[in-house]
Amino acid sequence: MSKIDKPLELATQAAQEYKGCYGDALLSVTVYGSAAGDDFDPERSDINLLVVLDNVTLEAIEKSTAIQDKWLKRRVARPVFMDHAYMNRSLDSFPIEFFNMQHCYTVLMGEDVLGNLEITRYDLRLQAERELKGKWLHLMQDWLAVKDHRKRLQELLQVSLGDFTAVFRGLLHVRRQPVPQDRIALWDAVSQVYELQVNPFNEVQTAALRGDKKKMREVFVEYVRAIEILSEKVDQLPREESP
């Protein structure tokens, strides 16, 4: 896999090709996530784009298929395509996804579509509780299928930790706390704010990166328990909407 030293430059090149494809129908291209921040991994991270069109249809998305395929080979993921109508109708349905985009992004061309989004703490709390409880169940179920397979266990830990990390950002905002960009600082902050006695998240990442089967199995128990406790604490938060 090729190394990416300058993700913003690569993202800008891709954005220019999308502009050439859509012309005036393209309202904005935004890079979000690690490529817009400080924790981009040149060896592993993908570049994520939000492309806003005046009207998103299947035909519109298919129009740029060749561009998508070309850049996918260079670790620029297929864009998330949206229009203003979809964004305005979906803030209460997917507040965590929008909050994570809003947390770390750079506008490459066109308007800033993320800066003025109003995401309520009430909606964040509801989705966060749902995500924690649902992913916790899947984590335990998947464990039975992967616990004896090193690579599959490694993948489960890496993918699930990334999913939970996205939820953690929203959980800190719900409690009106700063949201660190650094993942380790984020895990520490969530553990402190929600008073978790055990913070296994850094150990989970280390074990998964090393592919150490024995260590991955050891940390999994604390990992599952920490998520369970966190979901219980979120369930006990006040239900009323906070400004």
Image (spheres, rainbow, N blue to C red):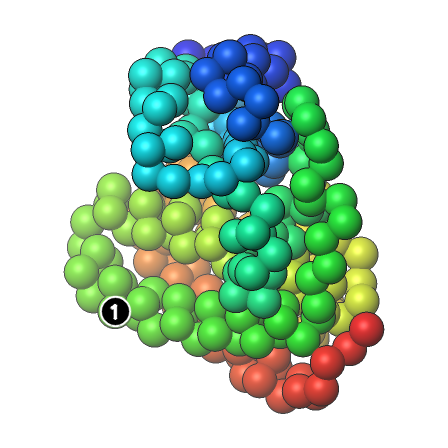
Q: Residue at x 33, y 38 (%)?
A: 58
Quick check: 148 above or below 138? above
- The quadrant where residue 168 appears: bottom right
In this picture, residue 201 sits left or right of residue 111: left
x and y percent of residue 110 in the render? 68, 26
Mark 1: amino acid: Gln
- Label 1: state its secondary structure: helix
Residue 29 in view (yes/no): yes
The residue lying toward the viewer, choosing from 79 and 170, is: 79
Quick check: 224 above or below 232? above
Q: Residue at x 45, y 23 (%)?
A: 76
x and y percent of residue 16 in the render? 56, 13
Total numbered labels placed on residues in the image: 1
Residue 37 in view (yes/no): no
Q: Residue at x 61, y 35 (%)?
A: 32
Quick check: 16 above or below 110? above
